[in-house]
């Protein structure tokens, strides 16, 4: 599992970093995303649902922690 640390980055940067990471690392099956941006608690689950990724909210923080399985459900 790879970690994307978006601590102290404001919206939309955590979501943009997640999307960039996914596009550049297609072989990575699981990602941990850490962020302090409270809008991410809405944006990250919405993105995962649209994309078909399995999401687990580990901490509803802050910091917020998400585990994202990139295997489509």
Image (cartoon, helix red, strand yellow):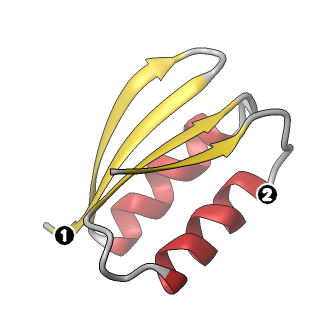
Residue 45 in the image: x percent, y percent? 45, 48
- Taking 32 as reference, is 21 left or right? right
Mark sitting earlier along the chain (1/2): 2
Horizontal and vertical percent for residue 37? Answer: 75, 34
In percent of the image, x 58 and y 15: which residue is there? Answer: 61
Q: Residues within 10 Å of mark 1 (few under 14, many from 20)?
A: few
Q: Is residue 16 left or right of residue 44?
A: right
Q: Which residue is mark 1?
A: 71
Residue drawn at 58 percent across, 41 percent down: 42
Residue at the extreme left of the image, as rendered: 73
In the rendered image, the vertical position of residue 37 relative to residue 22, given as above or below: above
Q: Residue at x 32, y 51 (%)?
A: 1
**Residue at 57 percent of width and 35 percent of height:** 41
Can you say which quadrant of the picture contains the C terminus? Answer: bottom left
Q: Which residue is mark 2?
A: 13
Frontmost residue, 72 versus 46: 72
Determine whether the residue tagged by mark 1 lies in a helix, strand or loop: strand
Which labelled disc corresponds to residue 27?
none
Q: Position of residue 32 (x, y in %)?
A: 43, 44
Label 2, residues with CA under 10 Å away: few <14, some 14-19, many ≥20 = some
């Amino acid at each position: 599992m790879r970690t994307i640390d978006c601590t102290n980055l404001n919206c939309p940067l955590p979501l943009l970093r997640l999307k960039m990471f996914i596009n550049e690392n297609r072989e990575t099956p699981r990602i941990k995303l850490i962020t302090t941006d409270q809008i991410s608690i809405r944006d990250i689950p919405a993105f995962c649902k649209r994309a078909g990724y399995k999401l687990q909210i580990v901490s509803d923080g802050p910091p917020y922690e998400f585990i994202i399985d990139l295997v489509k459900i």
